[in-house]
Amino acid sequence: MFRRRYRVYSARMPKLLDLYCKAGGASMGYHEAGFEVVGVDIKRQKRYPFEFIQADALDVLRDTAFLRSFDAIAASPPCQTHSRTKHLRDAQGKTTAKVDLIPQTRAALIASGLPYVIENVPGAPLLDPVVMCGSSFGLMVRRHRLFESNIPLSGLPCAHKAQGRPVGVYGSMRDEIPQGGKTAESIDQARAAMGIDWMIWGELVEAIPPAYTRHLGQQLIRSLEDEDRTRDARSSHDQSGGSQRVLGGVGASR
Ligand SMILES: C[S@@+](CC[C@H](N)C(=O)[O-])C[C@H]1O[C@@H](n2cnc3c(N)ncnc32)[C@H](O)[C@@H]1O
């Protein structure tokens, strides 16, 4: 209660915890939407652009006192078990982690009581997700990604035709691709296609274009503001009407 009032009246930036953040593609979009962002990853991320904690996300999710210092949580749990590229990797004899942290992560996010967004690849078992695509933002990647939330979110329609042939930012640079052509020619081309200027190739291939989470983060902030307004209206109503009702009730009982 006090925390939310503090946010409204001091105009402090709302705080978002980004779990499984890697080098911060999703984090950057939430930051651009207006959040102060703290990232968590099990591996050190030396190019992560915001405050960073190296830890297991599931341990962080158990720290309820720590979670209470945030207004919202985003999570990109490992997705290799669901990725459509898994079959390609299997065929190429490349190893694929078999972890699926989505169910545990979702359960802990629900238990936190905070607004949350879980991101994953097409094929992942997310609940009623919205789909985002680079073509909707004038980017040269398609990179469809699913986003589940406990607040209503809206996506945007794809614009594949207007986009034309996308730039592939996956696998290796200048790799032959099944549809013909090659993946990105250079790191600069890949960065421009993703709307990210600080990552190396190995980070770009796993990143979310910040445009996606900027769009979703703006909706998240509006939802937090609506929640504040509703709470404030309810509390001023209770202070006036509520106390009258109590007095009336006391009088009536005499
Ligand atoms: C797909 S990447 C996230 C990409 C990021 N959302 C972005 O937009 O740039 C998934 C990350 O999860 C991290 N990870 C895997 N298991 C983890 C765990 N138990 N706790 C924290 N991070 C973990 C990996 O190290 C990897 O950096």
Image (cartoon, rainbow, N blue to C red):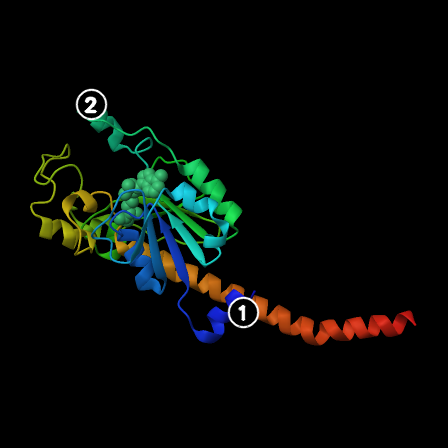
Residue at image position (42%, 46%) is 60
Q: Which residue is mark 1?
A: 229
| Residue 145 badge | none
Q: Secondary structure at mark 2?
A: helix
Q: Is 92 left or right of 3, judged from the image as shown?
A: left
Q: Residue at x 14, y 49 (%)?
A: 190
The dot on residue 91 is 2
Q: Quadrant of the C terminus?
A: bottom right
* 157 and 235: which is toward the camera: 235
Residue 209 shows in the view? yes
Q: Position of residue 17 (x, y in %)?
A: 39, 54
- Name the foreground residue: 176 vs 233: 233
| Residues at marks 2 and 1, CA–CA distance in whole angstroms | 54 Å
Secondary structure of residue under mark 1: helix
Is residue 220 shown above or below 140?
below
Amino acid type for the residue under numbered disc 1: Arg
Q: Is residue 57 left or right of residue 134?
A: right
